[in-house]
Image: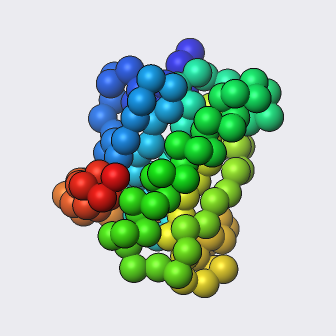
C-alpha cells in the first residue's frame, strides 16, 4: 500500500505543495509544530532515509536547502531547523521547521491544527518566495 506521501505525490489526496521537481516534493505538514512547517520528500518511496542511494540523499538535502531559503523569506524566524524522525510515515522525509527557540522543534509538543485556508495562505507565500 502506498504511503500517504506517495498518495500526495500522485495527487490521490490533496496537499499544500510548495515546490517539486522530478525527484522531490515539498509540502506543508497539515499538523505542524509551528506555522510554515514543511515536509521534504523524495518521490521514490523508501521507508528509511539512510536506505536512499547517495545521489537521492544528497539531492534531498540540496532541494530542502532551496525550500528553507523560501521559508526564511516569508516566515518570521531566526532559523529553519531540520529534523529526521522517520517513525510516523514509512516514507523517508525531512521536516523543515521555522524556529525562534529550540522548543519550536520539539516533536513532543502539541501540534497546531490550522484551517485549510490558513495552510493555503502559508503555502502560497512560501511558493511565491521559492
User: Is residue 36 something one can see in this rendering?
Assistant: yes
Q: Position of residue 110 (x, y in %)?
A: 55, 70
Q: Position of residue 57 (x, y in %)?
A: 70, 35
User: How many numbered marks appear?
Assistant: 0
Location of the N terminus by quadrant is top right
User: Is residue 47 something one can see in this rendering?
Assistant: no
Q: Is residue 77 above or below residue 1?
A: below
Q: Left or right: 98 with respect to 20?
A: right
The structure residue drawn at horizontal position 37% and vertical position 69%, both measured from the top left corner, is 73
The structure residue drawn at horizontal position 52% and vertical position 81%, both measured from the top left corner, is 78
| Corner quadrant of residue 22 | top left
The structure residue drawn at horizontal position 75% and vertical position 24%, both measured from the top left corner, is 53
| Corner quadrant of residue 105 | bottom right
The structure residue drawn at horizontal position 66% and vertical position 71%, both measured from the top left corner, is 106
Q: How was this image coloured?
A: rainbow
Question: Could you say which is closer to the camera, residue 72 or residue 96?
Answer: 72
Q: Left or right: 28 with respect to 59?
A: left
Q: Position of residue 49 (x, y in %)?
A: 73, 36
Q: Is residue 67 above or below residue 103?
A: above
Q: Position of residue 5 (x, y in %)?
A: 49, 32
Question: Could you say which is closer to the camera, residue 69 or residue 38?
Answer: 69
Q: Left or right: 17 with respect to 58?
A: left
Residue furthest toward the right? 50
Amino acid at each position: 500500500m502506498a504511503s500517504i506521501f506517495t498518495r500526495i505525490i500522485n495527487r490521490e489526496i490533496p496537499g499544500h505543495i510548495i515546490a517539486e521537481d522530478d525527484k522531490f516534493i515539498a509540502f506543508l505538514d497539515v499538523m505542524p509544530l509551528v506555522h510554515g512547517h514543511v515536509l521534504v520528500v523524495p518521490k521514490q518511496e523508501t521507508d528509511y532515509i539512510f536506505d536512499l542511494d547517495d545521489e537521492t540523499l544528497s539531492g534531498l538535502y540540496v532541494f530542502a536547502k532551496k525550500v528553507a531559503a523560501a521559508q526564511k523569506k516569508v516566515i518570521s524566524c531566526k532559523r529553519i531547523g531540520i529534523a529526521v524522525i522517520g517513525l510516523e510515515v514509512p516514507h523517508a522525509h525531512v521536516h523543515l521547521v521555522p524556529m525562534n527557540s529550540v522548543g519550536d522543534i520539539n516533536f513532543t509538543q502539541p501540534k497546531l491544527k490550522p484551517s485549510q485556508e490558513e495552510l493555503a495562505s502559508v503555502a502560497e507565500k512560501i511558493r511565491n518566495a521559492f
